[in-house]
Amino acid sequence: MNDSTRVKLFLMMVLEFFVWGAWYPLIFGYLPSLGFTPAEQSWILTCFPAAAIVGMFFSNQFADRTFAAERFLATSHLIGGVAMLSLAWTRMFWPFFLAMLVHCLLYVPTLSIVNSIAFAHMKDARKEFGIVRMGGTIGWILAAWPMTFILVDWDRVNAAATNGFVGWLGTVLASGLTGPALQAGTRSVFIVAGIASLALSAFSLTLPHTPPKPAAAGGDRLAWLSALRLLKAPFILVLFLVTFVDSIVHNLYFNWTGTFLGTAAAAGGVGIAGNWIMPVMSIGQVAEILTMSVLGVTLTRLGWRKTMIFGILGHAARFAVFAFFPHSQAAVILINLLHGIAYAFFFATVYIFVDAFFPTDVRASAQGLFNLMILGLGPLVANMVGPMFISDTFNHGGVVDFTSLFMVPCVAAIAAAVALGLFFHPPARTQSHVEV
């Protein structure tokens, strides 16, 4: 892969994850401000995982067999970007739900498509994918940190008597929006995400051509059928199920962490100002940059299984700190570094593993098969049990028992790591050799 192609693929990842990172972390607190009922909020939050499920059987089929990947990317982000922009001015449930559904149906499959485009133009995915995928990490960070200056109480800043730029900057950083004002200001994230989506639509037309891959003679016309058949291999089935569990654990982080960080220390939380919640949650992506850069070396030295186990145990360690040291702001903030390491060592490694073991003509759908768990069924379960646990099961008189709450994903992650260690035994050979 030449330098020009590498730069284009890197920028593709930056924009792809910027779109998602701009709106996702704050939508959980924004929906109640629109007056939507809990049931309506659940419908909106299920758009993303539902789109991952639909994408497995529809969009990835086009990418694999009938549609050039870069053109699919451009079309999806054009329509999805317009839908995202409309959310900033939508206040009624049905228009909001339908616009979010349109965006998600078109955006979620592109998470598989960008991987397929990247892998198609790499000579050695184990060495090159980590560097390219690092662009996605940077994109998520770029989307999160500006919110420190966007979600600010500017009336308070303007009324303050400050001396010089340093004094003014300190006032800005200490004047985060809270309560209803924070919820109302969140609408700006949809504008930022929509503009980024339209930018990626245009940029996609400059990406290297990635043509469709017709089915091999005698193969299935539907690529996802071939991908599903690969689950008959025991080691792939084990990885598929472990991915499901770890995806639930991963998404419970987004469901609960914002509330945990923003809750006052007296009520069992951390007490972080509203404009700092997204930056704190993005610290893990900073660590992910370094982790992605050494992922190839890590895989070579540790192998598939050990690398993935370390990734899963990273989730467990983070939730353990949340559970037992909630009053230590330094510990809670720093442990977020493990979020990026856990993502790279498990989820990014899964994508590379799929590229190594699945037949060429179904790789995009194989990526979609695991995205069915990573972005579909896992988040769907997390979005169902997450609100119930934090508002009912572990809520006592309006005070959340965060220790018991966070022990649930902690124990689940440990169990998944043990299962992977005992039952995941892929062949030593790293060619695409799984029979379909």
Image (tube, rainbow, N blue to C red):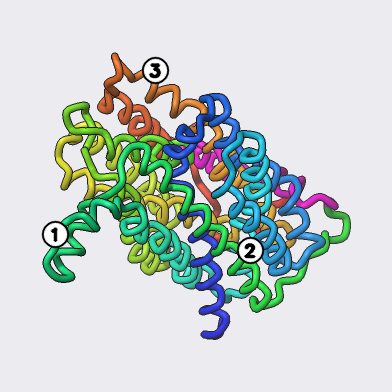
Q: Is residue 402 left or right of residue 254?
A: left
Count of picture labels: 3
Residue position for label 2? 116
State yes or no: residue 238 in magenta. Answer: yes
In front: label 2 or label 1: 1
Residues drawn in magenta: 220-246
In front: label 2 or label 3: 3
The residue at 42%/50% (across/down) is 308
Q: Vertically, is 71 above or below 359?
A: below
The amino acid sitting under disc 1 is: Ala
Residue 161, label in figure: 1
The residue at 71%/76% (across/down) is 209
Mark 2 and mark 3: Cα distance apart in space: 41 Å
Task: Return the residue nearer the eye: 374 or 29.
Answer: 29
User: Where residue 107 sits: x, y (%)?
Assistant: 63, 54
The residue at 49%/70% (across/down) is 132
Q: Vertically, is 427 above or below 206?
A: above
Q: Assign a secondary structure to mark 1.
A: loop
Q: Quadrant of residue 119?
A: bottom right
